[in-house]
Image (cartoon, helix red, strand yellow):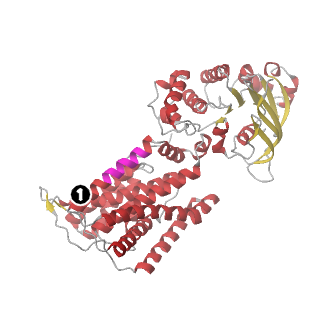
Amino acid sequence: MSEAVVEVRDLEAGYEPGVPIVRGASITVGKGEIVVVLGPNGAGKSSLIKAIAGLVPITGGTVLLDGKDITAAPAHTMVRLGLAFVPQTENIFPLMSVEDNLKVACGIIERREIPARIEEMYAAFPDLVRQRRTTAGNLSGGQRQMLAVARALIVHPKVLVLDEPSAGLSPKFVAMVFEMLAGIRKSGVTILLVEQNAKAALAIGDRAYVLVEGKDRHEGIASELWNDPVVAELYLGQRSRRTGGAA
Amino acid sequence: MSLQFVVDGLLAGSMIGLGAIGVTLTYSILRFSNFAHGDFMAWGTYATLAVVGAIGAMFGKIAPIAPLSFGWPLIVALILGVALTGLLALLLDFVLFARLRAKGQAIIVVMASFGASMALRSLLEFVFTSRPTYFSRAIQIAMPVGFGIRITPDQIALLLLTSVLVLGVHLLMTRTQTGRSMQALSQNAALARIVGIDVASVVRFTWIIGGALACIAGVMIGILIQIRPFMGFDMLLPMFAAAILGGIGSVPGAVLGGLIIGLAEAGAVQLIGAEWRAAVSFIILMAVLFVRPIGLFGVRER
């Protein structure tokens, strides 16, 4: 692992004071890596990355981005700091055109540079070009996910953080989304994602963490974790579900 | 039936529409019905009147600009009035609405706006009395323009001003980063933060736009009709009707809704008498909502 882009140390976070959902989680994402956070339902995976993105109040621990402490930074400043987040659902503005969805995310980009950035995203996601005037709410599930990722990438973030990018998608689109993420990593973007679909995520990931009850309980090389007996144990014997593909 | 109702209706519709823009933006972005919006109108008008008075006291009597009933003091005063009304809206948000919004119950904010409305209105009555007043007592001669329609120079100027403002606000909403941020916030506040939008600054901007347009609509009423502390409160129901009719959140919708209601009211006054004015606009509102509950320009969430 090369230098760390994201470094989370003993993070505690939760919506209500005194009821932490994330309980001392520590993860590291190296430059250019895809890191996957797995775990059974209710393990606090989503809350962990939402806390990193400034969306869940943090009660303890630290989040470093490129060595800089961003623990207390408000959510709307994250893009400027270099962290772009893609929520699991409702991750596009449904009543705006595809192009306006991209433009609205360009607040930190210099005005002259915006058209070039939008063209850059269209080049990376050719499916979106044909739909540039379409109201985003009319896109298919896979195209919505593409738009959400393009919207996050347009600011050239240091790290792309995704909350279950395959959730709610049909198997065809699931494969497409993971293919897209592998491609994005190839272009040099660091990726941190939470996934229920362990098999597909481990197939494209470099390293993975298993989160149980708000704490990282296991860490390993993504390709090895699939057959790791500890992981099976931590998943509380949900082996059959894991092999079932999309969870 | 005389076609005069077209001019009367367009003018009433302009005032309703300009006010309804503020109502529809506040509703869609801050998610509450601001019942104090009418009183922003009245405060803006009285602020403008006060500045006109101050200019008069400093520079003596200044002749109006050729065919119009008002001169540059009113134009300067309107610009200051617009700024002051924007500040009033910001102040009210800071001391009242923002604190209640943080507690997360929309109905409490709505009720608070009712209270603010009464307080603002009573303050106006206290300071300026409830006697009607005017920017100018000069009588303007209406020019015949054919088809039995007569229109005064003031009316022409204000219709033009409305068109420019509506076009300006529409372009602002659809072509600028600020406008897109406002749309984003109204569609999904959490995602707006994620994409880097500073919600607090967009909210401030929304108040300033709403307050500014309310002031201009109020001054139009002051120029064409009269200035009273209740002038804004009396506009509240037509403004809400226009915003709902046009589709909540839509600027062109609010203006079109205002024009429809203004024209319907003016037509009703001619056809069946002035006492039916309000009833007619609400019958239209209900009819539209039965057929298209999201309003004319409203978009169903998907």
Most common secondary structure along the magenta stretch: helix
- On whether residue B171 falls in the magenta region, the answer is yes
Q: Is residue A172 above or below residue A93?
A: above
| Residue placed most toward the observer, B284 or B92 | B92
Q: Is residue A204 above or below residue A92?
A: above
Q: Which residue is mark 1?
A: B156
Q: Position of residue A43 (x, y in %)?
A: 78, 38
Image quarter of the N terminus of chain B: bottom left
Residue shown at 40%/74% (left/top)? B229
- Number of labelled discs? 1
Q: Is residue B188 above or below residue A202?
A: below
- Categorize mark 1 by other alpha carbons within 10 Å: few (<14), some (14-19), many (20+): some
| Residue placed most toward the observer, A147 or A114 | A114
Q: Position of residue A70 (x, y in %)?
A: 73, 42
- On whether residue B247 falls in the magenta region, the answer is no
Q: Position of residue A206 (x, y in %)?
A: 76, 22
Q: Is residue B270 above or below residue A94?
A: below
Residue shown at 50%/65% (left/top)? B88
Asked if residue B150 shows in the view, the reply is: yes
**In this picture, which residue range is highlighted in magenta?**
B162-172
Q: Position of residue A109 (x, y in %)?
A: 56, 36
Drawn side of residue B198 relative to residue B275, left or right: right
Question: To which quarter of the image does residue B71 belong?
Answer: bottom left
Question: To which quarter of the image does residue B121 belong?
Answer: bottom left
Drawn side of residue A139 relative to residue B253, left or right: right
The amino acid marked with disc number 1 is: Ile
Drawn side of residue A111 relative to residue B193, left or right: left
Drawn side of residue A202 relative to residue B23, left or right: right
For label 1, the SS is: helix
